[in-house]
Image: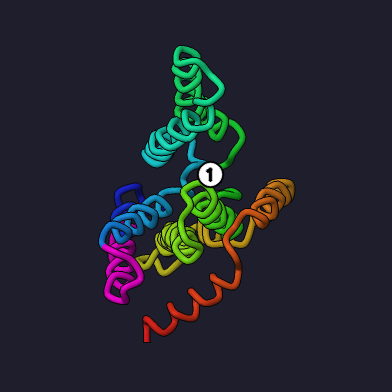
Amino acid sequence: MANFRTHITVAAAGGMLIAYAGWKGQWWPPSQALVMIALVTFGGILPDIDADRSHSIRLIFNLLSVPALVLGALLLQPWLTPGALLIACGGIYFSVRYLAGLLFSRFTVHRGIWHSLLAGGLCSLLTSALSFNLLNQPAWLAWSHGAATLVGFLIHLSLDEIYSVDLEGARLKRSFGTALKLGDSRRPMSNLLMLIATLTLIPWVPPWSVLGELLHQGSLLWR
């Protein structure tokens, strides 16, 4: 399978290409282009959140702990004293940075449900929902953020499948077909839980009509 350096390098290159195309098409300013690069790159390591020991899982939860800390502080500030808020924020950071990572290591299997198109869809919708509802971004930009995460996710899955082909021996390795798949055929309950989590995001995503228009404009951009 592709290693961490390959995943993050190829995803970053893909993010730069998308960011440049959107900037040339006047979809977003240079500041948003940087955001798009970051989201594609993050999506490019996100499937390895199910790895017990990897650079990806440490980096992912390191990155997630910062916005979780900021969000927790904003939500709890009106209700807590400064001292209690400090303790609560410390608990949030510790929980996301360490406990969440341990839980994922305990209850997930590498190349399982998180290496699937269903998981990519969940992460994409979650990104769009957070961008639209919490960051108050315009609907078209929120969908763009979700699309960037999905592109990075697909880059990761595609690389894993490409590296499952042994060109020298002209054969398919045993890992072939375990990354770029719809769901986890070995664990139906994981598929059901992931699908339920995805469906719960539907009311929170930006208007679907905006996504349709965005896809139409994107098809024109690449002609």
What secondary structure do most residues of the magenta stretch adopt? helix
- Say whether residue 30 is left or right of residue 196: left
Q: Quadrant of the C terminus?
A: bottom left
Extreme residue toward the front, this view: 78
**Front-most of 13 and 88?**
88
Q: Label 1 is placed on what type of residue?
A: His
Query: Which residue appears at 33% of the width and 52% of the height?
Result: 8
Residue 63 higher or lower than 174, as above or below: above
**Front-most of 180 and 94?**
94
User: In the rendered image, which residue does mark 1 sit on?
Assistant: 110
Residue 217 location in percent, x, y? 44, 80
Helix, strand or loop at mark 1: loop
Residue 104 location in percent, x, y? 55, 35
Residue 30 location in percent, x, y? 25, 61
**Front-most of 215 and 53?**
215
Residue 107: image quadrant is: top right
Query: Which residue appears at 48% of the width and 42% of the height?
Result: 49
Query: Which residue appears at 45% of the width and 16% of the height?
Result: 82
Residue 112 location in percent, x, y? 59, 48
Extreme residue toward the bottom, this view: 223
Res 157 seen here: no
Mark 1 residue crowding within 10 angstroms, few (<14) / some (14–19) / many (20+): some
**Front-most of 65 and 77?**
77
Extreme residue toward the top, this view: 83
Where does the magenta region start and end?
A: 11-29
Per the image, is 18 magenta?
yes
Res 13 seen here: yes
Residue 210 higher or lower than 1, as above or below: below
- Say whether residue 176 is left or right of residue 39: right
- Say whether residue 124 is left or right of residue 60: right
